[in-house]
Amino acid sequence: MFDERSRDTQRLLSLLDIFFTVLSFASALWIFEQIHSDEQVDFFSHIAILPLILALLIFSLSYFNVYRNPRSASSVFYVAAIIQAMATVLGILFFLLFILNIHYVSRIIIIGFAATDVTLMIGSRLIVRRNFLRAINQGKGLLNVLIIGSGERALLLTRALKKKADWGINIIGYLDTDPELTGRKVSGGTILGTVDDIHSILKSHVLDEVIVAIPRSMITDVDSIALACEEEGVKFRFMADIFNIVAARVSLTNLADIPILTLEPVALNETKLMIKRFIDLLLSAVALPILLPIMALIAIAIKIDDGGPIFFIQHRVGLKKRLFPMFKFRTMHVNAEEMLKDIEHLNEMEGPNFKIANDPRITRIGRFLRHTSLDELPQLINVIRGEMSLVGPRPMSIRDVELFDKGIQRKRFSVKPGITCIWQVSGRNNLPFHKWLELDLQYIDNWSLSLDIWLLLKTIPVVLLRKGAM
């Protein structure tokens, strides 16, 4: 988001949403008491759930993108998104009230509150959108910008500003280092002078911002420009793509008054990551009591088979290349690691991953566990511990990682590893290593909560039909 006015609008709407929620809840409670004066309503018990409602609503509104800018959102979008967000809140709230067997909270009050709150939130957005469109049509509040540079980078910046600036842009002009270019037209604007004229230009024009769009070779000229902007009280911006790196997310933070520019290769929404973690914990907590009897039978079968350890615990490379102990039911003989060097030449998989169809290291019960994927069940412990997720690239062993031959392969360590991913539902061991990696990177670049849910549902028939298992 380029324009600070858009951020201010979001903050205003966020505060209004909180205010409307509290007001709607209090109004619904008061109206209920007036209509049903003969019924005893526990005021404080109802107020006690208000913080939960606010927390659920804030997450839900963010998830359904209700704070999207009016430039790219229609009135219909706002209405639908707010209704979806409130429906989600009500669904979760009623589920919790049912599970916890809470009867003293009136469902009628909750529904009345929801109807009032939705109406107020929709109304506030329609008013904001109407004022926004009116300001755009009347040309009010355009951002006056001076661009330092007139080359390809400056033209690229100009096109981006005109396309993305929410409230509209007025390019006052351009400055260049070559005095012979003064007066030349550039993308609908004029080169007003050279960088040395920055002081006079700032004094003679009404400017909101100065943006530097010069190549890295001219970076020494930036000091005088920044100083001039500071003296004139004009906001100074600098195009940070001087390193020729395509970053998924760029952010700036202050560290003891030192500006730190951050270029992130993977952009992950923190709110959605929290929801993903909640889903991991919820589904694992629900699944474990059901699966414990099966896991107990598997443990007994492993012990009867060869008397060795029940679990195979191996350190795998996880998020940010941190090692963690991954749990699996043991499917190989105790000395399987020592046997590997003798059969490594039989590897049937392309790349560093090692697989052969009739691996002599696999035990009798182990072959069944692998075909049914039951050997993976203990990884729910890793999910609960926070080392893995239900969905994510499979965690790789230290040996396999050391055999990576391309740097981009390590991008998989920018996200938490998982029990299932696109690879598992697309052929598993039938796919070559380079395709496996390609699918992992595809997951990372296109991650969303809906993709996670789709992969979890897709995994069920794949496991049941034993597709690609070895």
Image (cartoon, helix red, strand yellow):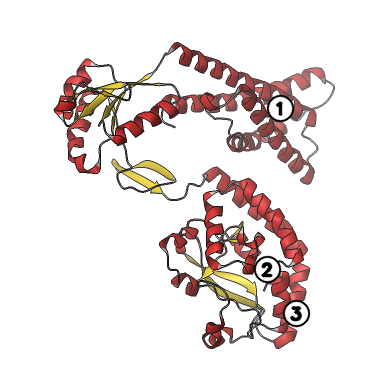
Residue at the image position 53 percent from the left and 88 percent from the top: 342
Count residues near mark 1 (Cα–Cα under 10 Å), then give few for <14, some for 14-19, many for 20+. Answer: many
Q: Position of residue 319 (x, y in %)?
A: 49, 60
Q: Quadrant of residue 177?
A: top left
Residue 391 to residue 334: above or below: above
Determine the CA span between mark 1 and mark 2: 48 Å
Residue at the image position 52 percent from the left and 64 percent from the top: 434
Determine the CA span between mark 3 and mark 2: 27 Å
Is residue 255 rendered to the left or right of residue 10?
left
Which corner quadrant holds the C terminus? bottom right
Answer yes or no: is residue 172 visible. no
Residue situated furthest right in the rendering: 38
Q: Secondary structure at mark 3?
A: helix
Q: Position of residue 178 (x, y in %)?
A: 16, 31
Inspect the image, locate mark 1, and give the three-letter code of the amino acid beneath it: Ala
Residue at the image position 57 percent from the left and 64 percent from the top: 394
In primary-sequence order, the first of circles 1 and 2 is 1
In primary-sequence order, the first of circles 3 and 2 is 3
Q: Secondary structure at mark 2?
A: loop
Residue 361 to residue 198: above or below: below
Residue that carries the numbered disc 3 in the rendered image: 300
Q: Position of residue 133 (x, y in %)?
A: 51, 16
**Label for residue 468?**
2
Inspect the image, locate mark 2, and give the three-letter code of the amino acid beneath it: Gly
Count residues near mark 2 (Cα–Cα under 10 Å), then give few for <14, some for 14-19, many for 20+. Answer: some
Check contact, mark 1 vs mark 3: CB within 8 A.
no
Q: Secondary structure at mark 1?
A: helix
Task: Mark 1 vs mark 2: give the one in front.
Answer: 2
Residue that carries the numbered disc 1 in the rendered image: 114
